[in-house]
Image: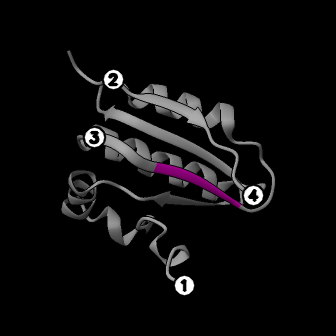
Amino acid sequence: MPDYLHVKPDPNDGRTTLRVGGELDIGSASELQRAVDGTFDGQDGEFHLDMSDLTFMDSTGAQALLHIHNAIEARGRHVVFEAPTGSVRGVLELLGLDQVLDIKPENSSLETQ
């Protein structure tokens, strides 16, 4: 059975974060866009999309991320795509989206003390 997309808000230090897991593809891209629209509060600051539990993404899913990026940036906010898994990051790099999107690796810098 496929691991379908699941999204949930993740409150962190007053910033808006949405955790995404499962598969982001043609069957779930619109679900993610609706979840972002429902979570996006229009306030100043960064909007974070935690992709650490995303196990699969195709080109339609990558296109959805670009759409989310463009929509949030057009509203004067910044979106950060956090901790994509290796296969997801590979798709982003293959499509050149790693040059457009603000992609941050896992928060390893926070644990280095």
- In the rendered view, tell whether residue 109 sits above or below residue 52: below
User: Spatial distance from mark 4 to mark 3, Cα to Cα?
Assistant: 26 Å
| Residue 6 x, y percent position in the rendering | 45, 28
| Residue 11 x, y percent position in the rendering | 70, 46
Which residue is depicted at the point 57% across and 30% down? 35
Q: Identify the residue under disc 4.
A: 13
Part of the protein shown in magenta: 46-50
Give the mark nearer the N terminus: 3 vs 1. Answer: 3
Mark 4: few/some/many CA within 10 Å (<14, 14-19, 20+): few
Which residue is depicted at the point 56% across and 28% down? 34
The label number, if any, that marks residue 55 in the structure image: 3
Front label number (3 vs 1): 1
User: Spatial distance from mark 2 to mark 4, Cα to Cα?
Assistant: 28 Å
Give yes or no for contact between labels 3 and 1 (Cβ–Cβ under 8 Å): no
Give the mark nearer the N terminus: 4 vs 1. Answer: 4
Q: Identify the residue under disc 1.
A: 113
The picture quadrant where one finds residue 26 is: top left
Q: How many marks?
A: 4
Q: Identify the residue under disc 2.
A: 4
Give the mark nearer the N terminus: 3 vs 2. Answer: 2
Q: In the shown orientation, is residue 76 left or right of residue 83?
A: right
Amino acid on which disc 4 is placed = Asp
Give the mark nearer the N terminus: 4 vs 3. Answer: 4
